[in-house]
Amino acid sequence: VGFSGALETLCGQAFGAEQFRKIGSYTYSSMICLVLICFPISLLWVNMDKLLELFHQDPFISELACRYSIWLIPALFGCALLQPMTRYFQSQGLVLPLFFSSFGALCFHIPFCWLLIYKLRYGIVGAALSIGVSLWLNVAVLWVFMRDSALYRETRNLELQEIFSSMKQFISLAIPSAMMICLEWWSFELLLLLSGLLPNSKLETSVMSICLTTSGLHYVLVDAIGAAASTHVSNELGAGNPKAARAAANAALYLGAFDASFVCITLYNYRKTWAYIFSNEVEVAHYVTKITPILCLSIFICSSTAVLSGIARGAGWQRIAGYASIGSYYLVGIPVGSILCF
């Protein structure tokens, strides 16, 4: 996801400048790079249990996480193709193929996941397999549309030299893009690891998981606003219309603030019952109720961050946003959170 964020700048601005062949060359070069990156990541996932035990995590949980990660490796390679294809369509404003392919994959995933987990009793292995199969189904549908569609055919008829020549430009922007996104997401995972070091680790990790899942569910919505802002900003900048890009950025910020306000008010009003969607433990639900006001504040701030990240990707400001992530999450957020917890 991090590396493919570079395509929001490159493909979006290329589309705005009507340089359609560059859209295809950037997309294909990113696919090659991301597939290669999957190999070292897979090696880490295979040894996930050893890595988690280095952080003093429960051995049983570490073993389960390792087994899940191993069976999730096929999904990793599918994601390496899906993310560039998503940016390819998104940068050209072709949202209907993305909608139909995602909706079809979701309709397939729900019963298939239920079948593997509850009927065939594959447990977490079944969950990982269902994610992988659904991702590859999504890739297949988008690939067929990308190959056969009459729209923007010039983005697909490329020479190998064009693809490889685009790699340097892609990598130069992909690294700060990955830094910007990954540093933010990893900070939340680090908080979850730290919660496992607290005295009542089972309760703490359960509550933290519910909070992160809740925040993540909303983040998907506001990230879509950020993606739309990225597309409009990059298209307008590529076409040489900075005023229109600024207007699109402002509209996205207002929409994100409205969305976050509505979600926070709703979540606060249902704070005593929300946790029971995830757990039937009274102690967990009571704990979640207590920290819901803090969760609402976090959701509101994260909403602004998601929209601003989209604007930064559209404008090509990934490096600046990456430095901001280091300062805010790792020089302030994680240390302050650790001091307050321990």
Image: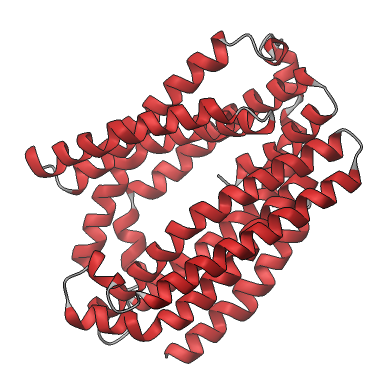
Task: Check the picture and name the quadrant holding the N terminus.
Answer: top right
Task: Check the picture and name the quadrant holding the C terminus.
Answer: bottom left
Quadrant of the image occupied by residue 109: top left
- Is 20 located above or below residue 342 in the figure? above
Report the residue at 64% width, 55% height from top.
179
Residue 326 image position (x, y, % from top left) = 66, 68
- Is 108 located above or below residue 291 in the figure? above
- Identify the image's colour scheme: rainbow, by chain, secondary structure or one colour: secondary structure
Report the residue at 70% width, 45% height from top.
230
- Is 274 located above or below residue 173 in the figure? below
Residue 125 image position (x, y, % from top left) = 20, 43
Residue 15 image position (x, y, % from top left) = 77, 27
Report the residue at 76% width, 22% height from top.
22
314 relative position to 76: left or right: right
208 relative position to 258: left or right: left
Task: Count every numbered label the image shows and give the total.
Answer: 0
Asked whether 56 or 335 is in front, the reply is 335
Quadrant of the image occupied by residue 56: bottom left
> Is residue 166 among the parts visible in the rendering?
yes
- Is 161 located above or below residue 12 in the figure? above
> Is residue 318 among the parts visible in the rendering?
no
Asked whether 294 or 335 is in front, the reply is 294
Report the residue at 25% width, 78% height from top.
285
Quadrant of the image occupied by residue 203: bottom left
284 relative position to 104: left or right: left
Residue 296 image position (x, y, % from top left) = 49, 75
